[in-house]
């Protein structure tokens, strides 16, 4: 799963998709991420 994190990051940051959408596009289940702080990092809403 960790190999997908950079791709998920690119999809989220540059394409504007959600964490779940990025996982879906890559064919990965979002539930596969077991480290809570890694998942929380990707689910946080950026402050503007």
Image (spheres, rainbow, N blue to C red):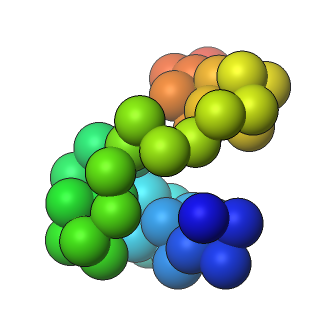
Q: Position of residue 34 (x, y in %)?
A: 65, 34
The foreground one among 31 and 42 is 31
* Residue 16 in view: no
Q: What is the number of callouts on the image?
A: 0
The image quadrant of residue 27 is bottom left
Q: Position of residue 10 (x, y in %)?
A: 52, 74
At 30% from the left and 75% from the top, the residue drawn is 26
At 72% from the left and 22% from the top, the residue drawn is 36
Above or below residue 45? Residue 26 is: below
The foreground one among 4 and 7 is 4
At 75% from the left and 32% from the top, the residue drawn is 35
Q: Is residue 35 left or right of residue 33?
A: right
Q: Position of residue 37 (x, y in %)?
A: 78, 25
Q: Is residue 36 left or right of residue 12?
A: right
Q: Is residue 16 left or right of residue 36?
A: left
The image quadrant of residue 44 is top right
């Amino acid at each position: 799963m960790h190999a997908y994190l950079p791709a998920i990051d690119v999809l989220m940051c540059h394409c504007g998709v959600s964490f779940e959408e990025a996982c879906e596009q890559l064919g990965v289940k979002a539930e596969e991420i077991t480290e809570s702080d890694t998942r929380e990092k990707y689910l946080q809403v950026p402050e503007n």
